[in-house]
Image (cartoon, grey):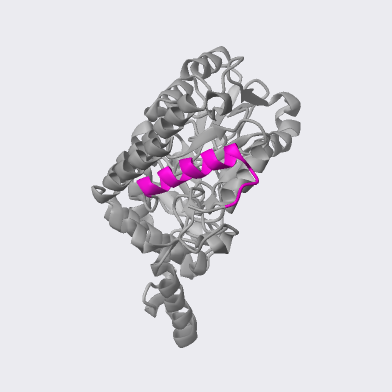
Amino acid sequence: MEQWLREQEAAARAQDAADDLRAMRSQFRVPRAGDIGGAGDGECVYLVGNSLGLQPIATRGAMEAELEDWARLGVEAHFKGGHPWFSAHEEVRGMLSRVVGALPREVVAMNSLTTNLHLMMVSFYRPTRERYKIVIEESAFPSDSYAVRSQADFHAPRAGFDASRAVVRLRPREGEATLRTSDVLDLLDRERDTVALVMLGGVNYLTGQLFDIRAITACARARGMAVGWDLAHAAGNIDLRLHDDGPDFAAWCSYKYLNSGPGSIAGAFVHERHLHAGAGLPRFAGWWGNDPKERFRMGPDFRPVESADAWQLSNPPIFALTPLRVSLELFERATMPALREKSRRLTGLLERLIDERNAQKPAAAVGVLTPRDQAQRGCQLSLVLPGDARGAFAALQARGVVCDFREPNVVRAAPVPLYSTFHDVWRFVVALDDALGGANAGGGL
């Protein structure tokens, strides 16, 4: 085992040396192991960008510049600042559209994720007595479950349907951990006359499964269903093609793979076919969704701009938008295709090392919930730990590894290609093997 580990470490370092994106790591602040409760003073192994991305080094300076504009210019910073506040959301539009594969006018940075989902459902969940169901996955993130059920509860009295039957939850087959695309399509076909909205997570937060966005969207739209995607775990992780795939809407947060800081500003997509003034969609309106040419005439009538901006309510929070701009500038340098290719290699290495470690220690084998097919996953592998899983997770942190735990026995590990290294993957497997061999043993990497 020790000889094998040495050989794998040398191979991982060689991959890092050949990595065209290796310089990107130096653009981020990587926590020290000791600061997060681990042993040693070196950088930790940070594999939890699927929960909170690392801070870009340039973020602090950009935030200080906005504070200085506020101090120096006051309200005049709306038009005279280094990044004028009046049009600040427009400055990120092009970069954001390239991350999610959309036209620039189809995207907007605004609000928080669940707020955006509710605003989108105001427009696209329009139930009737006969067609009222909402399809989500069984293991959807809880906030999505709360949001769709509350929407059903809100509409049920007026539309005349039973809200308790409105939410249809997709479940894997018995003995399987993830959904088969064919089963999703079969359900949509069976329920073709009763489903009003399909709203799945592009990448499931628990299993790491990447759904076939194009196939599911096409099937649902052909059957008269509205389609939306929660892309919290997909934006900045996979190479999305929202415009071409054609969902009605999508929404995402930006504090995970988009590295904009805790609780920071979210994003939304509305397909171009819905952006014309005559589209006739219901919506909740606010000042910043009004046509900017009319905005300061202060009139009572709402004239939506023909872009996703029309769903905005208020002017953007500058101190939440600024970190997003900084991070998106790094995505511009790296490009999503290059990041996606590195992600495949990182998870491929992690999967192979886990498999080879399991072959040497079958009595303490680690399971993998996430699909083996790289086309069906992003940069997260969800691992099922044997024995005292929570104890092993605590032992990982003691060894300077940051990932996360889902009851009863799942550790989610996400090597993020913007800043994770192949050596990080090797260090994680070494720490995991040590943790499973003795959850109370000390030592770092």
Residue closest to the eye, 416 or 215: 416
Which corner quadrant holds the N terminus? top left
The x, y position of residue 236, in whole percent, is 41, 47
* SS assignment for the magenta stretch, majority: helix
Residue closest to the eye, 3 or 101: 3
In screen coordinates, is 138 left or right of 279?
Answer: right
Is 93 part of what is drawn in magenta?
no
Question: Which residue sits at x=67%, y=41%?
Answer: 390
In screen coordinates, is 419 left or right of 71?
Answer: left
The segment highlighted magenta reads: 421-442
The x, y position of residue 328, in whole percent, is 37, 57
Q: Residue furthest bottom?
A: 72
Q: Is residue 80 above or below residue 278?
A: below
Residue closest to the eye, 363 or 316: 363
Question: Which residue sits at x=60%, y=34%?
Answer: 140
Is 428 part of what is drawn in magenta?
yes
Res 437 → quadrant: top right
- Residue 20 visible, this orientation: no
Question: Which residue sits at x=61%, y=43%?
Answer: 393
Question: Which residue sits at x=42%, y=29%?
Answer: 356
The x, y position of residue 252, in whole percent, is 50, 46
- Residue 202 visible, this orientation: yes
Q: Is residue 323 above or below residue 342?
A: below
The x, y position of residue 143, in whole percent, is 65, 42
Res 326 → quadrant: bottom left
